[in-house]
Structure formats: C-alpha cells, structure tokens
Image (cartoon, grey):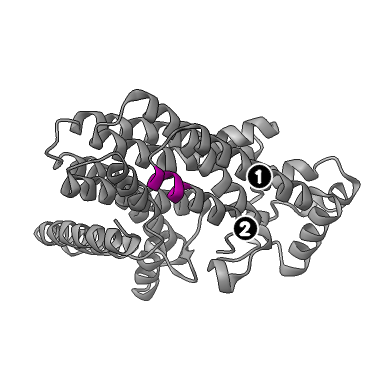
Amino acid sequence: MSAVATRGDVDAVLEEFFAARVARAAAVGSAHEALWRRAAESSRGGKRLRPLLVRSAHDAYGGSEPSDAVLIAAAFEVMHTALLLHDDVLDGDLVRRGHPNLAGRFAEDALGAGVAPRPSTAWGSGSALLAGDLLLSATHALVARVRADTRGRIHEIVDDCLDLTAAGEHADIGFALGTLAPTPEDILRMMARKTAAYSFSAPLRAGAVLAGAGEDALAALDEIGTDMGVLFQLRDDMLGVFGTVARTGKTATGDLREGKRTLLVAHAEGHPAWEAVSHLFGRRGLDDNDAARLREALVASGAAADMERFIADRHERIRARIADAALPGVLARELTRLARHSMERDA
C-alpha cells in the first residue's frame, strides 16, 4: 500500500467522520459547531506518518482487513490532532505553522467582538482544551467501528500509549518549569513516552495485531518503534533550535524562549560557553539576538556536535534492530527508509 493511497483512504474516513460530528454539533449550537469544524480543520494536512505505519505493519504481516486498518489509521491521526491541540495549550501557543491554531482562531473571534485580550485568550485556550478532549474520545469511537475480533486489543494499545504520552508530557512540563531536575536518561525516557509511544510503537503494533502477528513480532516492533520515535524527537529538538521557519513552519526561538529541557541543552550544561548565557534560556522576552547567543553557545560547548553524533549512533542502533528482528522484507525496508529520513530531515 503506497503512502499516497494510505493518505487518500484515511482522509476520506476523516472527512466523513468530521462531517457527521459537525452536523450533530449544529443541533447543539453555533459555538459547538464551530468547535467541531475547527477541530476538523486542525486534522487536515500533515505527514500522515502514523497511518502509514499502521497500514505498513498490517499489510506486511498478511492482514486481510484493509477497511479496519484504515479506521485504526484514522484513529491515530485523530489522536495526534488531539495531542497537538493540548500541547499548544500547555505551551501557550496561538499559532501553528505560521497560522492561528484552533485556540488562536477562537481568541481572534473574541477580540473581534470587542472582548478584552485576557478573556479572549482564555476562551481560545479553553476551546482548544475541550476540542482535544473530544478528539481523544473520538479516537476510541473510531476504533469501536473496527469489525475484527482484535478490536479490544487495539483499544488497549490506544489506552496504554495515551497513558505513556501523558506521563511524558507531564515530565516535559516539569523539566521546563524546573520542578523536576532531569538527567540525560530522564530526558530520553520522556521522549520515549511523549513521542515514540503514540507516534511509532503503538501504530506499528496496532497494525500488526490486526493482522494477527505473534507476540515476538509485537515485542520487536515495540522496541524498534520506541527507538524510531526517540530518533525523530532528537532531530525535532535540533530543528527547534537550528531549523528555519521556511522549512519547519515554526520559529527557531520557541524552544529557547520556553526553556525546553532537551538532550541538546543537557549536553551544554556545565560548559563555560553555555553558563555565560544560560540566564537567557527560558526568558519569555527572548529576542532574536539573544536567541542567536544561545545557539552560538550550544555550538561552542560542543553540544550540537555531540547531538549529531548521538543521532547517528541512534540511527545505526535502529538499523541493527531491524536487521535482527526478522521482519517481513517490505516492512524492514520501509522502517529503514523512515529511520534514515528521521535522521536527515530538515522539516
């Protein structure tokens, strides 16, 4: 199953699903209809990585339930949208990829109606929080439509990965606020939970479970998916500091302004170059000049070079795991390709 075909099938399911929810919401009231309509808009676009992993695992293990695989793939995409909405609320962001996000659009509506800035922002954030809650519920609603007798197991995979994702997000907040003091191992564990669990490991296992894969295969996919998710997040953290708006669609000062505790920062801590500017890290009023000073310190400290070596090592570890796992050939090739892309991507 090609990536294009997977995207088309999943998009069709999502459009039908959201159209039904918007129609139902219209009977409740215009604000609720707008909430669902904008939730639907938030789900459009993106890489559709999770659906591709579901379909790849299902097809590689000889699955015979393509319509169920599409439902599960769509469910993971709805989950992804929910978590992005919640993440923006936690970060206080009103913009995503250069445009107002769901919270930003509701805030703009309120401002345009003459509401003061503070309650307008609160309205936007509250709307995004509730939209995310609705989409998490919708994730299970989509899985409930699966006809195969593995449906209950899929629900458990979804529940488990959401629990791990919440644990990872909670830790990430604590690291940024300074309420938790992370070691590099803690940061890697947070990545495995916050990103890898729902973006890589769970979609792979869900597709394989639907196809009837055995426990050894599921364990291997869990390990490989976790490593791939960490690799993806490591590159994402580098792009969050050294990327360009033109490529990533987001500012390269956000993580520095929020004081995001990444492995990159952990590698710099204690070095004189970083300590000289560390008082700027996490400053809400951080400007471009001060952000440039922080980037220069991350390079001078050797942290940026350390991270590139760490990313390359993680990539080799994934390649070795894939080779040792005796995966179906087509899946091994797809995961090898994705691992390399995750290492080299610039957006």
Residue 143 in the figure: left or right of residue 3: left
Residue under the point 55% across and 53% down: 342
Amino acid under disc 1: Thr
- Label 1: element kind: loop
* Residue at mark 1 to residue at mark 2: CA–CA distance: 10 Å
The secondary structure that dominates the magenta segment is: helix
Residue 185 in the figure: left or right of residue 300: left
The answer to whether residue 117 is magenta is no
The N terminus lies in quadrant: bottom left
| Residue 172 shows in this picture | no
Residue 54 in the figure: left or right of residue 231: left
The answer to whether residue 332 is magenta is yes
**Residue at image mark 2:** 240
Q: Is residue 156 above or below residue 110?
A: above
Q: Residue furthest right?
A: 272
Residue under the point 30% across and 48% down: 55
Q: Sequence-wise, which precedes: disc 1 or disc 2?
A: 2
Residue under the point 54% across and 38% down: 227
Residue 51 in the figure: left or right of residue 27: right
- What is the quadrant of residue 125 in the picture? bottom left
Q: Which of 215 and 18 is in front in this view?
A: 215
Amino acid under disc 2: Gly
| Residue 200 shows in this picture | yes
The x, y position of residue 54, in whole percent, is 32, 46
**Residue at image mark 1:** 262
